[in-house]
Image: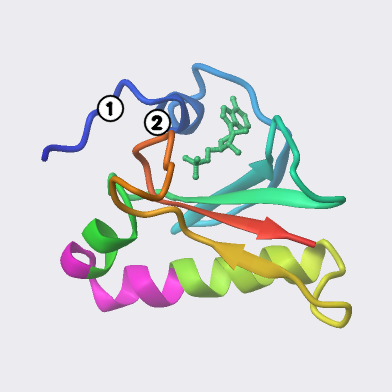
Amino acid sequence: MEYNADNVFAKILRGEIPCKKIYEDDYALSFYDINPKAKVHALVISKGMYRDYNDFVNHSTDDEIAGYSRAVLKVADLLGLTTSGYRIVFNTGKDSGQEVPHLHAHILG
Ligand code: AMP
């Protein structure tokens, strides 16, 4: 399955749709989920065009994996969650309920 650049997160990356930004670097962009399912609910999307976690780990570079992983932790830290604790969720694959086909971590605190 090919990556489809029509998805809402690709549009946010291109600046076509606004977001409530938390953090951005060369590997990731983070913003608040529009429909929060926890007291704190952030999303961290990859700068690279990957459909999901399987696609990302199978096809990205080690630099991208390291940079993206560090960005996820950076966001948890910025949100003040590293001491209290948080969940990271990657909905992946047809039975996961993934709605947006662009790699994203949910950070739930
Ligand atoms: P998933 O089911 O893992 O694909 O999660 C997609 C998430 O994206 C859901 O939690 C949505 O609430 C969230 N979402 C969809 N559109 C936007 C948007 N424009 N800005 C922020 N979050 C969004």
Q: What is the spatial separation of the Cα atoms under label 1 and label 2, in whole angstroms?
A: 6 Å
- Residue at 80% across / 77% down in the picture? 85
Residue type pointed to by label 2: Ala
Counting from the top left corner in percent of width and height, residue 70 is at 55, 74
Residue identifier under label 1: 5
Q: Which residues are magenta?
A: 58-67
Point out the image quarter for the N terminus: top left
Q: Nearer the viewer, residue 38 or 10?
A: 38
Under circle 2, the secondary element is helix
Residue identifier under label 2: 10
Task: In the displayed orientation, state which residue is furthest to the bottom.
Answer: 83
Q: Give the quadrant of residue 66.
A: bottom left
Q: Give the quadrant of residue 4.
A: top left
- Residue at 80% across / 64% down in the picture? 78
Residue type pointed to by label 1: Ala
Left or right: 42 in relation to 57: right
Assess whether mark 2 and mark 1 are in contact (beta carbons under 8 angstroms). yes
